[in-house]
Image (spheres, rainbow, N blue to C red):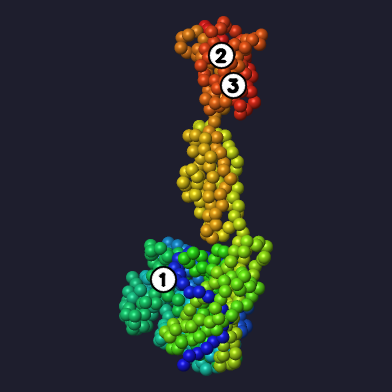
C-alpha cells in the first residue's frame, strides 16, 4: 500500500562528498539550554531538566556542545557528556591514555553500577521528563572512550546508558527504567567489551568480551571506528582512541504520556582514562518523519543553518521509520524568502522508493545583487497523521546576502637592496564568502602574502577568489628598487687612475638626471643630462660647486674640493 505524507520542503538530489573537520567543543550553555535548544527535535515537550542531581540552570564542565562538520565522529554537531572535562575530546589523538579531570568528582551512579557490575566514578548524568507526540522516541549518538583499545576485554571499562522509564516500562533500573543504548537489533548494551576492534587489548582477555557479546569479534565490530593514532585523513581529529559509529537509540512509547529519560556516563573500576557520549543535535524526536537540514559548500555538506545568496545551496533531509513501501511526499515552503525570486522553484512532491529510508531536497539561492535585505528564512513543514492525531514538523534555514569583496594593499614604495629585509606584500581583504584564494602577478605565487623581489623595480597585484567563485583584483603596487645617490666631496684629479672622475654612486638608477658643475664665481664648468659618471675635471686645486637633480628628490646643491696631491 502506498502511504502519503504532506510535507513542506525543498529540492534537487545530487551526490555529495564528505570531508573531515576537527572537533570543537563549548561549555557556554547550561544543561537546560543544551537540552531545549540543541538536543530537542520535533514532537517532544521537555521539562524538569537536571544534571548530576542539580537543577539544569548551572554550567558544568562535564556537559557542553560540540561541532565537527562531517568529521570522523559521524555527527556534525550536538551535545557531549564526558567523565572528565569536555575539552578532553579535542584532537588530535596524541595520547593513548588521556584524562582531563572534571572540576569535581560527582561520584558514583547506581544504575551504571548495576549495568557494568562495577563501581563507577566521575558520573555525568543528565535527566529530564518528556511528553512524546508520537508512538516512538529516538535519538542518534556515538560513544567514545580513551580505554579503547588497550583495555578492550578487561574489567576497567567505562560505562554509559540511556535509561527510559514511564508507561510500558518495567526494567531493572531505578523507576523501573530500561536501557535503550543497545547494539542494533539486539538486547546487548553498547559498551567497550561489546563493540570494539574485535581484538582483545593488551590488558584484556578475549573471554571477557565473549561473555559480554558472543558477536564481539564476528559482526558487531562493524559498529566500531578505530581512532588510535590513525594517520588516514579524516581521522585523528578528536582525542578519543576509539568510538562507535553513529547509532540510534529508540523506544516504543505512548503519545501524550509523560516519560523520564536518564542519559549517564561514568568511569568504571577507577577514575583513570576518560570517556564520553555525543548526541546529535535535533535528533531527540517523536514523529513518523524526521527533518534536518544544512548547507552545501562545493563538495561538502555542513550542518550550518545559514546559506549565502549565489554561493551555497541549502539541503533538507527527511527520514522515515521504515522502507517497506513507496511513499509520496507532498511539500511546500514557508518563511520570509520568496520561492522563484530568492531561490529556485520547488516541485510539489517527491517519491521515496521501496527500500529507502531517507531522501534529500536541495535548493539554490539567487544572487540578486541587492545588499541590506537582512536575513531571510526558508522553512520546510511536514504534516502527517500519527497515533495521537495530526502532527506538523518543520526545519528553518536562513538566507543571507553576499557581501562583495574588497582588497587594500599599502601603496608604492621605494627601496634600496641591502637596506633591510624584502618588504612583505600583505593585502587586507574583506567581504566575500569562505576562504580566500590568491594568485599573484607577476610571480605566480598562491600564498596570502609574498616578499617583494629586490632585484628590479616591479609592479605587483593579486587576484583574490573566494569560495563562492567570485574574484577581485587588488590595486597595483609598484616596488621601486632605487638607492639614494651618494655625491663625493673630494676629487684627486691627478690622472693616477684613482678618484680622478666625479663618480656619483647610484646615479644610473635615475636616468632622467641633470648635473651642473660651477667654479666659485658661478661659471658653468660642465653640464650633463643623464650623467654617466664620465667627467674628469682638469682643474686646479680649489673649491667648486655642483647641482645634481635626480628628478625624484629635490636638487642636491653643495661644494666639492679638488686636491691633485692630497
State whether residue 58 is above or below residue 538: below
User: For residue 48, which numbered disc appears in the image?
Assistant: none
**Callouts 2 and 3 close, C-beta under 8 Å:** no
- The residue mark sitting in front, 2 or 3, is 3
Q: How dense is the environment of label 3, judged by Cα within 10 Å: few (below 14), some, or many (20 and up)?
A: some
Could you tell which of marks 1 and 2 lies nearer the N-terminus? 1
Distance from disc 1 to disc 2, alpha carbons, whole Å, reads 81 Å
Could you tell which of marks 2 and 3 lies nearer the N-terminus? 2
Q: Which residue is mark 2?
A: 490
Q: Indicate the position of residue 448 as horizontal and vertical percent values.
A: 52, 50
Query: In percent of the image, x 53 and y 40: which residue is there?
Result: 459
Q: Which residue is mark 3?
A: 514
Q: Indicate the position of residue 344 as horizontal and vertical percent values.
A: 57, 71
Query: In percent of the image, x 60 and y 72: which residue is there?
Result: 340
State whether residue 152 is above or below residue 472: below
User: For residue 242, which numbered disc appears in the image?
Assistant: 1
The reply to whether residue 81 is visible in this rendering is no
Query: In percent of the image, x 52 and y 94: which residue is there?
Result: 168
Q: How dense is the environment of label 1, judged by Cα within 10 Å: few (below 14), some, or many (20 and up)?
A: many
- The reply, left or right, for residue 532 in relation to residue 59 is left
Foreground: 44 or 482? 482
Could you tell which of marks 3 and 1 lies nearer the N-terminus? 1
- Give the quarter of the image for residue 547: top right
- The residue mark sitting in front, 3 or 1, is 3
Q: How dense is the environment of label 2, judged by Cα within 10 Å: few (below 14), some, or many (20 and up)?
A: some
The reply to whether residue 415 is visible in this rendering is yes
Query: In percent of the image, x 33 and y 70: which residue is there?
Result: 202
Secondary structure beneath disc 3? strand
- Give the quarter of the image for residue 92: bottom left
Q: How many labels sit on residues?
A: 3
Amino acid at each position: 500500500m502506498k502511504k502519503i505524507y504532506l510535507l513542506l520542503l525543498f529540492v534537487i538530489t545530487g551526490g555529495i562528498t564528505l570531508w573531515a573537520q576537527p572537533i570543537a567543543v563549548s561549555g557556554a550553555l547550561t544543561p537546560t539550554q543544551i537540552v531545549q535548544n540543541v538536543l530537542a527535535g520535533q514532537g517532544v515537550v521537555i521539562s524538569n531538566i537536571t544534571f548530576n542531581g542539580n537543577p539544569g540552570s548551572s554550567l558544568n564542565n562535564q556537559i557542553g556542545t560540540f561541532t565537527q562538520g562531517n568529521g570522523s565522529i559521524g555527527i556534525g554537531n550536538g551535545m557531549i557528556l564526558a567523565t572528565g572535562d569536555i575539552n578532553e575530546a579535542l584532537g588530535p589523538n596524541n595520547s593513548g591514555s588521556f584524562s582531563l579531570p572534571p572540576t569535581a568528582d560527582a561520584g558514583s551512579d547506581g544504575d551504571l553500577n548495576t549495568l557494568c557490575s562495577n563501581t563507577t566514578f566521575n558520573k555525568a548524568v543528565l535527566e529530564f521528563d518528556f511528553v512524546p507526540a508520537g508512538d516512538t522516541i529516538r535519538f542518534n549518538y556515538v560513544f567514545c572512550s580513551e580505554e579503547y583499545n588497550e583495555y578492550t576485554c578487561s574489567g576497567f571499562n567505562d560505562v554509559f546508558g540511556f535509561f527510559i522509564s514511564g508507561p510500558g516500562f518495567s526494567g531493572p533500573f531505578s523507576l523501573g527504567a530500561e536501557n535503550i543504548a543497545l547494539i542494533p537489533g539486539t538486547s546487548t548494551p553498547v559498551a567497550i567489551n561489546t563493540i570494539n576492534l574485535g581484538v582483545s587489548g593488551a590488558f584484556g582477555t578475549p573471554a571477557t568480551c565473549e561473555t559480554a557479546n558472543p558477536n564481539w569479534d564476528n559482526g558487531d565490530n562493524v559498529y566500531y571506528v578505530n581512532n588510535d593514532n590513525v594517520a588516514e585523513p579524516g581521522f585523528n581529529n578528536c582525542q578519543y582512541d576509539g568510538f562507535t559509529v553513529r547509532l540510534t537509540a529508540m523506544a516504543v512509547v505512548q503519545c501524550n504520556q509523560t516519560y523520564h529519560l536518564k542519559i549517564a556516563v561514568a568511569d568504571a573500576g577507577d577514575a583513570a582514562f576518560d570517556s564520553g557520549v555525543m548526541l546529535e543535535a535535533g535528533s531527540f524526536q517523536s514523529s513518523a518523519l524526521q527533518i534536518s537540514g544544512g548547507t552545501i559548500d562545493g563538495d561538502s555538506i555542513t550542518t550550518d543553518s545559514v546559506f549565502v545568496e549565489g554561493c551555497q545551496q541549502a539541503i533538507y533531509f527527511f527520514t522515515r521509520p521504515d522502507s517497506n513501501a513507496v511513499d509520496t511526499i507532498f511539500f511546500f515552503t514557508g518563511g520570509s524568502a520568496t520561492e522563484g525570486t530568492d531561490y529556485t522553484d520547488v516541485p510539489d512532491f517527491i517519491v521515496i522508493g521501496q527500500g529507502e529510508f531517507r531522501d534529500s531536497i536541495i535548493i539554490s539561492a539567487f544572487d540578486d545583487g541587492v545588499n541590506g535585505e537582512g536575513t531571510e528564512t526558508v522553512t520546510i513543514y511536514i504534516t502527517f497523521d500519527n497515533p495521537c492525531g495530526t502532527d506538523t514538523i518543520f526545519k528553518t534555514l536562513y538566507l543571507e546576502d553576499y557581501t562583495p569583496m574588497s582588497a587594500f594593499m599599502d601603496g608604492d614604495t621605494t627601496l634600496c637592496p641591502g637596506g633591510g629585509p624584502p618588504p612583505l606584500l600583505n593585502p587586507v581583504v574583506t567581504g566575500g564568502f569562505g576562504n580566500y584564494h590568491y594568485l599573484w602577478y607577476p610571480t605566480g605565487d598562491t600564498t596570502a602574502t609574498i616578499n617583494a623581489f629586490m632585484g628590479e623595480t616591479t609592479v605587483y597585484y593579486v587576484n583574490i577568489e573566494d569560495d563562492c567563485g567570485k574574484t577581485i583584483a587588488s590595486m597595483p603596487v609598484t616596488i621601486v628598487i632605487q638607492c639614494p645617490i651618494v655625491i663625493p666631496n673630494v676629487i684627486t684629479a691627478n690622472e693616477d687612475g684613482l678618484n680622478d672622475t666625479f663618480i656619483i654612486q647610484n646615479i644610473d638608477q635615475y636616468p632622467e638626471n641633470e648635473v651642473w658643475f660651477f667654479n666659485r664665481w658661478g661659471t658653468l664648468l660642465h653640464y650633463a643630462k643623464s650623467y654617466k659618471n664620465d667627467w674628469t675635471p682638469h682643474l686646479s686645486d680649489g673649491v667648486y660647486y655642483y647641482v645634481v637633480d635626480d628628478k625624484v628628490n629635490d636638487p642636491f646643491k653643495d661644494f666639492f674640493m679638488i686636491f691633485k696631491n692630497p
